Image (spheres, rainbow, N blue to C red):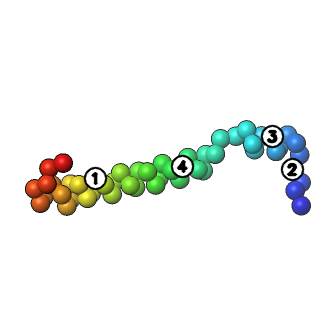
Amino acid sequence: MNNLSEEERKKILESSPVGTWALMLIVGGGMVIAWLLMYYGVFLPRGHIG
């Protein structure tokens, strides 16, 4: 079932998790954008100064 050679397995284990980092950046960026929209779109127009 697992037909990877030792070289391929070692290469996979030593490589960085690029997809995980990309997903973390997307989620983190979305949270920052959502926070900024709430801050500038909801709190500041109502007169709340943080």
Residue 23 position, x and y percent, is 53, 53
24 sits to left or right of 2: left
Amino acid type at image mark 3: Lys
Q: Secondary structure at mark 1?
A: helix
Residue flagged by tag 4: what amino acid is it? Ala
Distance of label 4 from label 3 (alpha carbons):
22 Å
Location of residue 8 with respect to 48 vertically, above or below: above
- Which of the numbered marks, if any, corresponds to residue 4? 2
Find the distance from the CA under tag 4 to the CA under tag 2.
Answer: 26 Å
Q: Residue 25 placed where, x, y %?
A: 48, 48
Q: Is residue 25 left or right of residue 14?
A: left
Residue 26 numbered mark, or none: none
Residue identifier under label 4: 22
In this rendering, would 19 be left or right of 40?
Answer: right
Whichever of labels 1 and 3 marks the residue nearer the N terminus, that label is 3
| Residues under numbered marks 1 and 4 in contact, where contact means CB atoms less than 8 Å apart | no
**Image location (x, y in percent) of residue 12:** 75, 44
Which amino acid type corresponds to the residue marked 1 in the rendered image? Leu
Mark earlier in primary sequence (4, 3)? 3
- Displayed quadrant of residue 8: top right
